[in-house]
Structures are given as C-alpha cells and as structure tokens.
Image (cartoon, helix red, strand yellow):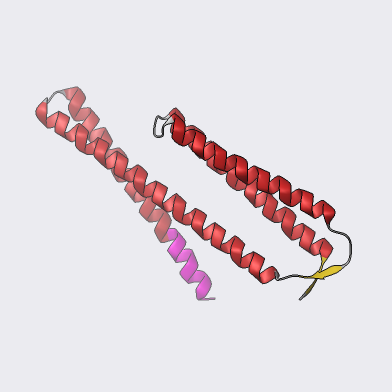
Amino acid sequence: MAVDKYELGKQMILLASQYRQMGDALSTNAYEKFEAHAITKKEFDDIQQNVTKLFEQAIEINRKVMEIPSGSIDVDLQGIENATEKLKKATGRINKIEKIVNISIKALAAIGASVLAVMTPNPGTIATAVQSAVTLAQEIIDMTSTEKAKKGKASASRGR
C-alpha cells in the first residue's frame, strides 16, 4: 500500500508521543510506589531504566521522522497499528495485575491488623483493623466498578 510520507511521519510522531506518555505514567507510578515504600530502590531503578528506554525510543522515532524525504512509500500501516494495539492491551494487563497485587497487599495488611486486634484488643488495634478492612473493601469496589464500566462501554459500542 502506498502511503504519503507526511502521513507516515504524523503516525510516527503520534507513536513517539504515546511512548513518552507511557514513560511519564510509569515514572509517576513508580515514584508514588517508592515514596509509599511499596517497592524497593532496586525495583524503582529498574522501572526508571525501562522509562529511559521508552524515552530513547521516542527520541529515535522523532529522528527517523526527520529523515523521511517527501513523496510516498509502500508501508504496512495495519501492521504498525496492530503492534500499537497489542502494546496498549499489554499495558492494560500490566495495570490490572498491578491493581490485583495492590489489593493482595491490602488484604494481607487487613488480615494482619485483624490478627493484631484479636491478639491485643484495644481501641487502637481495633480501629486499625476496621480501617484496613474498609480500605480493602473500597479498593475491591473501585476495581470491580471500573471493570464493569469498561465492559458496559464495550458491550454498548458493539450494540451500535
């Protein structure tokens, strides 16, 4: 399929922008987790290395755009779009796994707080146990309502 190089350049710039956005989101998330002591310094550094790779890829894409001469070329844009879609789905799966891990950690904290409240019952341990249970329940509600909303939107768009 013959594609105008200008249009290809626009698509490449959009892809580079998506890489930068993913890098920003990953970096922000890692920083928040590190500040909350949810990940180690090594895990934080590993994530930041991956973020750097995303930014380097975005820069390389922008360089390549500058090298495109005018005219048209034969390109498989569908293949590029499919690869981008797979990347978006993989990112979604990673986010879902991350939510499940966070809920698991909160469940462990709630269980620990409950055990502590049973072993040493006093207003402080009981309040901590109740708060941990409430936080866990809210996380589960938020995650399931988000999933239901996504499924509802997907089924509504299929019904059109």
The answer to whether 8 is drawn above or below residue 34 in the figure is: below
| x, y percent for residue 49 | 56, 38
In the visual, does 19 lie left or right of 153?
Answer: right
Q: Quadrant of the C terminus?
A: bottom right
Residue farthest along the right direction in this orientation: 70
The answer to whether 69 is drawn above or below residue 47 in the figure is: below
Q: Residue at x 76, y 49 (%)?
A: 62
Q: Is residue 158 magenta?
A: yes
Q: Residue at x 24, y 29 (%)?
A: 128
- Please state the extent of the stretch shown in magenta in the rendering: 149-160
Q: Residue at x 16, y 29 (%)?
A: 116
In the visual, does 87 lie left or right of 94?
Answer: right
Q: Residue at x 88, y 60 (%)?
A: 69
Image quadrant where residue 103 sits:
top left
Image quadrant where residue 1 sits:
bottom right
Specify whether residue 105 is in view.
yes
Q: Is residue 146 magenta?
A: no
Residue 158 or residue 5, whichever sits in front:
5
In the visual, does 61 lie left or right of 72?
Answer: left
| x, y percent for residue 32 | 48, 33
| x, y percent for residue 24 | 59, 41
